[in-house]
Image: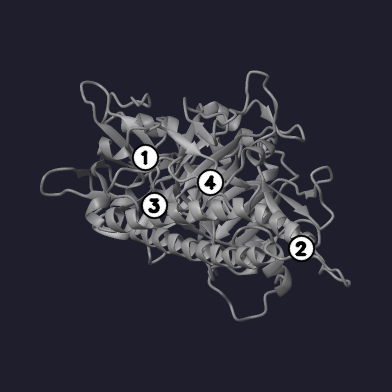
Amino acid sequence: MSSTSHTIDSHQVSLFETRRFFNGLASSPKLIYRTGAPWSLPNGPEAYTPRKSLVPVFRHPIRDVWKQTLSQELVDLLDARKILFTTIDVVHFEESDSAATADKPGFLSPVTIWIGVLIDSTTTTVAHEATEDILGLLTKYDIHDIDVSFRESIYVCGAGPTLLSPDDDVFHLEIISPITHTLGLSIASMARPNIEGTMALYLAEGGESGRLLGLTCRHVVLPDEPNTPFLHNDVAQEDVIVPGNTTANKISHQTRAHINSNQGAINQLNKNMESLEVQERCDDEAVATSARSKMAKLEPELTRLTAELEALQTLEEDFRTHWMPIENRVIGHVVFAPPIAFIPLCPPSDTASAPASINHRIEDWSILVLERPKLGTDFMGNTIDLGIDLSLSNFLELCTLQGDATWKVIRPFNGLLPLSGIIPEDYMTHPTTLDKKGQPCLLVVKTGNETGTTIGRANGLESVVRQYSPLREVIQTSLEWCILPHGSPCFTDNGDSGSIVAGIDGRIGGMVIGGCGNGNSAHDITYVTPFWWLLERIRQEFPNAHLDIEI
């Protein structure tokens, strides 16, 4: 039985553990069942519920059999018990308390097969019985040191004028970042302007064409179209806007809020200056001298705030005039989009006795033709702006690695990380760089419409992802590149679909297609289509497409 039962479940987890065991993760998913050490309630006057974070797995025997056979065997096992799983991830959990520090990190769990299931679909007893089957299966591979954990989690597809330069507004870059020409642009279909996503990359069409192309997810720009091949023509034109309505309204409201805040601060400073001017005219020289000293300190701040207010007022007027009319926000149109499908990674084996394996990847992409003049004269190509959410020092601190002497973090100039090259397939699972603990580590970065710039850690094993229809019928099961958060609770959220994920050395890793969580908050784990595979698919329609953009 896989539906929720009203009878007493002999393997029931305590309500507190159910709700708090995954404290610290972005969506705090509900625990259903797990193996491993007992978990006790925090107690005492300074009781602290430990916080968990996700840690990638590289060095473990499970990696040798995961993709070839074990992942498919787990799928078959869960299907046999009619468990409506959504994702299967292989991770560590690091558990830290209030005393944990960088030098004294928290407890690292054993490797855990972390299984997400649809909400209210699986009882604790069913999860327990499946766990017994899984542990028995692992013994076939002589693997005896793995935990199993079930949680409730769903898979979610996350979806004008000349663009501004990141240097155009030195005061409030966080306001204008969605409309600069660096990567992470907020985009939407003009026909459905409230459904937003992110543009991934710029591509040159190549050959004899001089067209500049843009890459994003199909479900971002064609959310309601029939799932058939889309080819641009004069009748079926799907214009794309920057930004979508939600982001445009957000920019407008943020600008006005900053103007009101600055005006209030200026008014208060002027009152203070008037009071000090009275004191300056006092016959008491000590009082007058003190007043002049205070005025000298206030004047630079008043000058700064006045300049900032003028810049904000100019931005507000420019945005209201040139950006709010939706027809002014058209940046290009969709020229091609294959149907969202599950594409075989390799031809099926002709040998009937060959071991079964999960042999599909989600194909969810579309190509836009962009209006090159709207990118401005200082267009920089494929560049990630780190300065919006990460200072250079914070970026370098998060990205401290050991290992390969030929590898290095690119020190971004003015917070801008240029992208070049592609992370190879083998490097994604066998990186030569090490973290501070000497473990393999592949750090990545993305800038998205919803969560801005975040750092993540790629996992050494791809995750199993299953999609369902609204009637909970299985659509397909696939393997996807798995990215875990690093330095923040989440790497992506809804609205980040289409974001490009790059190594912190500037090589392109892949495009965000979705994530898992409770559906109401940020993603615990992000799933990405590797770019080495995606570019092969794109070149079937655009054979000369390349990344060497003419700036």
* 160 to 285, vertically: above or below: above
Q: Give SS at disc 3.
A: strand
In the rendered structure, find residue 287 and report the number of the disc placed on it: 2
In the rendered structure, find residue 388 and report the number of the disc placed on it: 4
Mark 4, mark 3: which one is toward the viewer?
A: 4
- Looking at the rendering, in which quadrant would you find the C terminus? top left
Three-letter code for the amino acid on which mark 2 is drawn? Val
Q: Give SS at disc 2.
A: helix
Three-letter code for the amino acid on which mark 4 is drawn? Ile
Q: Position of residue 430 (x, y in %)?
A: 61, 28
Mark 1, mark 2: which one is toward the viewer?
A: 2
Q: Nearer the viewer, residue 250 or 266?
A: 266
Left/right of residue 335 with respect to residue 155 in the rendered view: left
Three-letter code for the amino acid on which mark 3 is drawn? Gly
Packing grade of label 1 (10 A; few <14, some 14-19, many >=20) is few
Three-letter code for the amino acid on which mark 1 is drawn? Ile
Callout 4 touching callout 3 (CB < 8 Å): no
Mark 3, mark 2: which one is toward the viewer?
A: 2
> Mark 4 or 2 closer to N-term?
2
Is residue 351 at all visible to an observer of this figure?
A: no
Q: Give SS at disc 4.
A: loop
Q: Residue at x 71, y 45 (%)?
A: 111
